[in-house]
Amino acid sequence: MAEVQARYGAPTVECPLPDGSRAAVWSTQPMGQYAWATKIAPDGTVGPVEQILTDSEFRKVEIGVWDTERLRCTFGFPAEIKQVGLPSVRQTVWSYRYKEAGTWNSLMHVYISDDGIVQRLHPGPDPLFDRELWPFL
């Protein structure tokens, strides 16, 4: 882990996992579009460091199963956390900046229930990078 930290610095998130290993995430959120993660075995062996803010990694999120702790330990902290919807149906949304399909400046919006469980997710354009499309923001 010392070699990995020498190259990447300290992880932005580190979480214990049920099998005794640890997850480590290096994130460029809130303004960046990339995050890298690895698994550290109980003996200190570090697995491959891989880019995780991708469509294929977001497809692994299980609706109704994953919670905010699992999101944080997998992807790091989101770029934005907002409340959306009418007062009677407000939801919390965690949004991660990333390159959709490796190309498009996007946000992956993850909707969270009041008890912290993922309800749905979908990508959308990121107004930070496309101001001409979103002049009112």
Image (tube, rainbow, N blue to C red):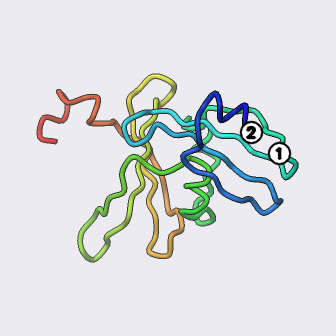
Q: Where 15 sits versus 132, above or below?
A: below
* Marks 1 and 2, the one that precedes in the sequence: 2
Q: State the image quarter where residue 38 is shown.
A: top right
User: Of helix, strand and loop, which one carries label 1?
Assistant: loop
Three-letter amino acid code of the residue under disc 2: Met
Three-letter amino acid code of the residue under disc 1: Gly
Pointers 1 and 2 in contact (C-beta within 8 Å): yes
**Mark 2 closeness class: few <14, some 14–19, many ≥20 residues within 10 Å:** few
Q: Mark 2 points at which residue?
A: 1
Q: Measuring 74% from the left and 44% from the top, which residue is drawn there?
A: 39
Q: Measuring 55% from the left and 55% from the top, which residue is drawn there?
A: 72
Q: Mark 1 points at which residue?
A: 44
Left or right of residue 123: residue 50: right
Q: State the image quarter where residue 35 is shown.
A: top right
Left or right of residue 134: residue 59: right
In the orientation shown, which residue stands out farthest toward the left?
Answer: 136
